[in-house]
């Protein structure tokens, strides 16, 4: 069955860095577009970043552009989110998700929590 | 950016009720809209894509309608497992954006 498992979250100080991983199984990873979403405590969903399946083209929310980098390793069935210069407002549950076709998302991981605090 | 406005932000309803949630885009999105259901402590679940296409495995009491910029999600007969928060998301263009959510609560 399709599974997505995030890891790498934790507590980090403002200005710090963290790299999240999303390990997938149960489908041919290289055939799918992928994304990262986040949800601050008690708040709604926010799209963070997206990576194309073919040419690796990437897209970012304005709030993370220049600080976050999305990447994928098809050989390892994994996607990553490198986060730098973290801010308190980046505190959230981060979910990876698989695009059903292009930009709606049919399978999600359980999330990994990132807390930015001094 | 395309802003997505959902209403109401919350609704109280009873089992068996018909519930309709509205989502309005700040400009036309050509029917490129998805609906998700999220229960506390869990990841969102895709219910509907392309405004009205039911995702595989989703009960037929859920339906989506609308075009251009105005969309609805309807639950024809609310079941106990449907109490959750619902989000719309435009899939037309980047940056992808979500509505603020509608919490369906037990009356």
Image (cartoon, coloured by chain):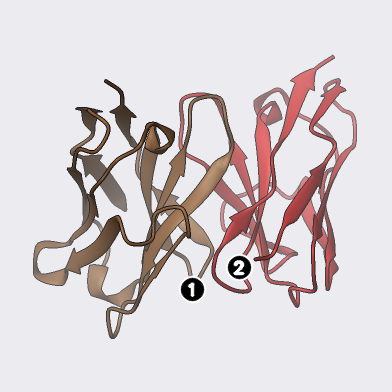
The reply to whether callout 2 and callout 1 are in contact (CB within 8 Å) is yes
The mark total stands at: 2
B45 to the left or right of B75: left
Rendering coords of residue A90 (x, y %): 39, 38
The one of A1 and A99 positioned closer to us in this rendering: A99
Identify the residue at the far bottom of this view.
A55
Quarter of the figure with the C terminus of chain A: top left
Task: Name the residue beneath numbered marker 1.
Answer: A102
Q: In the displayed orientation, state which residue is furthest to the left.
A: A75
Above/below status of A105 relative to A10 = below
Chain rendered brown = A
**Alpha carbon of mark 2 to alpha carbon of mark 1: how far?**
8 Å
Q: Which label belongs to residue B91? A: 2
> Please, what secondary structure does the residue beneath circle 1 have?
loop
* Relative to A102, residue A10 above or below: above
Q: Is residue A98 visible?
A: yes
Q: Quadrant of residue A80?
A: bottom left
Among the chains, which one is red? B
Q: Hey, which quadrant is residue A78 in on the image?
A: bottom left
| Residue A30 position in % (x across, y down) | 24, 74
Q: Secondary structure under badge 2?
A: loop
Residue drawn at x 46%, y 25% is B41
Q: Determine which quarter of the picture holds residue B70.
A: bottom right
Question: Does B68 sit left or right of B80 as displayed?
Answer: right
């Amino acid at each position: 069955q399709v599974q997505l498992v995030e890891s790498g979250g934790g507590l980090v100080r403002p200005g710090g860095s963290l790299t999240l991983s999303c390990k997938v199984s149960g489908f041919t990873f290289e055939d799918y577009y992928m994304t990262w979403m986040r949800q601050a405590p008690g708040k709604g969903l926010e799209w963070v970043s997206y990576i194309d399946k073919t040419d690796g083209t990437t897209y970012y929310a304005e709030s993370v552009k220049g600080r976050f980098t999305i990447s994928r390793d098809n050989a390892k069935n994994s996607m990553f989110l490198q986060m730098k210069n973290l801010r308190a407002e980046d505190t959230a549950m981060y979910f990876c998700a698989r695009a059903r076709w292009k930009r709606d998302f049919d399978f999600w991981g359980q999330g990994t929590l990132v807390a930015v605090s001094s | 950016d395309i802003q997505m406005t959902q209403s109401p932000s919350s609704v109280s309803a009873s089992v068996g009720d018909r519930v309709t949630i509205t989502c309005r885009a700040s400009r036309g999105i050509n029917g490129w809209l998805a609906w998700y259901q999220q229960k506390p402590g869990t990841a969102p679940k895709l219910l509907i894509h392309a405004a009205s296409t039911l995702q595989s495995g989703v009960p037929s009491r859920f339906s989506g309608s609308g075009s251009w910029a105005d969309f609805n999600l309807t639950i024809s007969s609310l079941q106990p497992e449907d109490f959750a928060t619902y989000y719309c998301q435009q899939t037309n263009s980047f940056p992808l954006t979500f509505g603020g959510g509608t919490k369906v609560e037990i009356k």
